Image (spheres, rainbow, N blue to C red):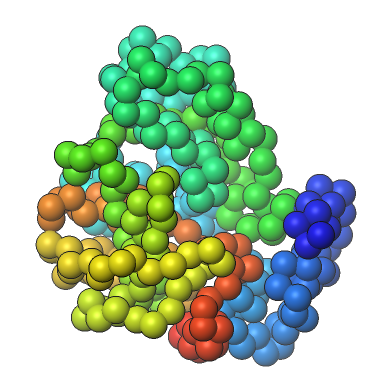
Amino acid sequence: MRHFISYIIRHYVTWLPDELYLRILFFIETGKFLHLNPARTFQEKIQWLKLYNRRPEYCIMVDKIAVKEYVASIIGRQYIIPTLGVWNNFEEIDFNKLPDDFVLKTAGGGGSCGVVVCRDKKKLDKRSVQKKIEASLSFDIFNSYREWPYKNVVPKILVEKFVSNGSDTDLPDYKFFCFNGEPLYCQLIRNRHSNETIDFYDTEWNHLDFVGLNPKAHNGRVSAEKPINYDIMLEICKKLSLNIPFVRIDLYNIQGVIYFGEITFYPGSGFGRFEPNKWNEILGNKIII
C-alpha cells in the first residue's frame, strides 16, 4: 500500500510547493513526520539540503555527461572513463560503430535505473534496453523527489568504455559519504546484479556494524580487503567534496587503477533506511547545515 500511495503522490500531486510535497512524501516513505527546524537525522537533513542548499554547480555535478569535464578539471583526466558517444534519443545510436562491450547510461538517470552494462553486443536485447533507457529519459527526478540539481539536466544518452576487472562479476562500487570535504564512510557494494551485498567501512578500513540504504541489503560473507591506493581514493573524495555539507562520491578501483563513477547528493533520495536505525542519527550529526 505504501508503494501505491507513493506512486500516486509522485505522479498526480507534483504541483504542490516543494516543502509541503516533501513533508507528505517523507511521511509516506518513512512513516515519520519530517522535522526541518531543526533537522536531526540523515533522512531529514537530506530533505533540508534538497530545499535550501541549491548551488548552480550541482546541476553540472549530477549530469553524467557534463560532470566528466568538471571532475577532470579538479583531479585529472586519468580518472575519467572515456565517453564513446552522446545521443539525444535511442534511435540515433549506431550500434555497429560501438565495441562489443560498453556501458550505456542516461545523463540524468538515478541509481542503476538508467544504466545498461553490455558485455557482448551480439547478445544485447535492444528492445528491452530501449524500453529501459527511454523510461529513464522520461523520468523526472526533480518532480518526483524534488532533487533540485536534476531540474536543468538535458535528457541525453551516453555510452562509456567498458572497464573490467577481468572476470564476469560486477565491479565493486566504492561510494564515499563525504561531509564538508571529509570522506568519513565508504559504502562498498558488491555483486550488484546477482547477490548484492553492502558493507560500510571507516577511513581506516574498519568494518562497521550497519547496512543501508537498501532495506533488503546484507553484509558480504567475508570482509573486503582494503583497495590498493585507498589513500588516493580518499584524496580524490576530499577534493571533489570540498565545502559541500554532504555528497557521495562514487569510485571504481581495478587493482589500484581508480576511475570516477558519479556524484550523488541525495542517496536513496533521503528515504533509505539504516539497520540499526541509530546510524540515521550518527550520520545525520555529521551533516552541518
Q: Above or below — where is 71 with respect to 90?
A: below
Residue at x 48%, y 88% (from the top left corner)? 282
Q: Position of residue 157 (x, y in %)?
A: 49, 30
Residue 153 quadrant: top right
Front one among 229 and 277? 277
Residue at x 17%, y 39% (from the top left corner)? 166
Left/right of residue 62 with respect to residue 54 in the rendered view: left
Residue 170 quadrant: top left
Front one among 240 and 222? 222
User: Could one spot residue 160 in this view of the protein?
Assistant: yes
Front one among 2 and 175? 2
Q: Above or below — where is 277 with respect to 231?
A: below
Q: Position of residue 277 (x, y in %)?
A: 56, 84
User: Could one spot residue 88 in this view of the protein?
Assistant: no
Front one among 24 and 32? 32
The N terminus lies in quadrant: bottom right
Q: Residue furthest front?
A: 221
Q: Position of residue 285 (x, y in %)?
A: 50, 89
Residue at x 12%, y 62% (from the top left corner)? 228
The C terminus lies in quadrant: bottom right
Left/right of residue 164 with respect to residue 144 in the rendered view: left
Q: Residue furthest top?
A: 96
